[in-house]
Image: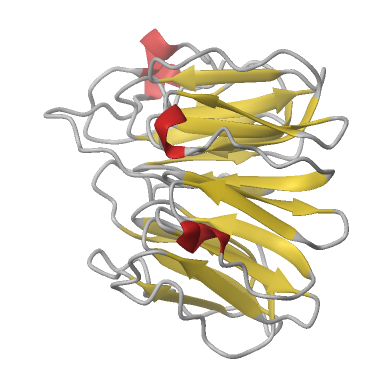
Amino acid sequence: MRAFRALPATFFVLSASCAGTGSPDACAEQSSTGDICWGDTPVVAYSAGDYRACAIGESSELSCWGSSFPDPPSGKFVDVSVGYAHSCAIGDDGAVVCWGTDDARNVFAVPAGHFTRVEAGMHFSCALSGLGEVACWGESEDYLAIPPGTFVDLTAGELHACALDTEGAISCWGMWDKYGAQDPPAGTWVKVRAGGQFTCALGSDSSIACWGFDADGQADAPSGAFDDVAAGFFHGCGHHIDGGWECWGSDSKGELDVGDEDFTSIDGGFHFNCGQNDVGALGCWGQNWSGEAAPP
């Protein structure tokens, strides 16, 4: 999930001294340019959120860093997603557990079931089961209006969710769709990722299309042939088929500066990104106000 919080009066981005340290102190120097800060241990899953991020290590245990927040639960996990004031993870038994400080919004009213993917939004969450069924819960019944279908991919933004069905079509739903983030284009798609109030998808023809809020150019995807797509709150990123990532949208905290790293995947947060390399190491860059871009 890529979620919103009001910007602080000052911000931190990564300095060259942070690379390879995984230390919040080393990574939190104010600078006008950003560099990637690498964690010390490999991960198997991760999620970048607002001012924090979480990852699942090779031991299947959760770790989180960034803004002050309740500790993640203990146990073995297979997926994790960071929302606005809550996060959710899927245990090795397929059950979803959520934690945080947003209990008044029903974000902890997790349904029973066996799930394979979870997505935390602003004041809601959704999960995808192994049978292709989507379940959602949260503050508004609008999030429960899940379109019919059998789904293979799921994503949640600030106020909306989208799912990709077995035929390659995208369905979106949620509340307050002022900018059209819930209005996907026709076509055949292979992956969908929601940002703040916009959405991007990777087509079967290797193109990327984005729609919704576009004040910073986040819905203006570049042309080219891609094999992956990611979305942050005000920016998007795509991986070129011939190698290398390209990001677009807001670059106010250096979040578009992926450099020469050819990550195997990227997840976008609020003015920062995290990416995983081919040996499982996690690197983050961009805004680091609360240590969110300094993985352990």
| Residue at the outermost left position | 9
Please provide percent x and percent y for residue 116. 80, 46
Q: How is the image coloured?
A: secondary structure
Location of residue 230 by image quarter: bottom right
The residue at the point 80 percent across, 76 percent down is 166
Q: Is residue 263 visible?
A: no
Q: Is residue 172 left or right of residue 115?
A: left
Q: Which one is in front, 20 or 176? A: 176
Please tell me in which quadrant of the rendered image residue 198 appears: bottom left
In depth, the one of 121 and 219 nearer the eye is 121
Q: Is the C terminus in the top left, top right, bottom left or bottom right quadrant?
A: top right
Is residue 276 depicted above or below 266 in this figure?
Answer: above
Q: Residue furthest bottom?
A: 186
Drawn side of residue 116 relative to residue 272, left or right: right
Q: Nearer the viewer, residue 210 or 141?
A: 141
266 shown above or below 199:
above
Residue 64 visible here: yes
User: Measuring 42% from the left and 23% from the top, which residue is drawn there?
Assistant: 101
Q: Which residue is at a point 32% across and 34% down the rendered structure image?
A: 287
Label total for image = 0
Q: Residue at x 52, y 37 (%)?
A: 107
Residue 49 position in % (x across, y down) = 46, 38
In the image, residue 236 sits, relative to residue 38, either above or below, namely below
Image spot of residue 275 (x, y percent): 58, 40
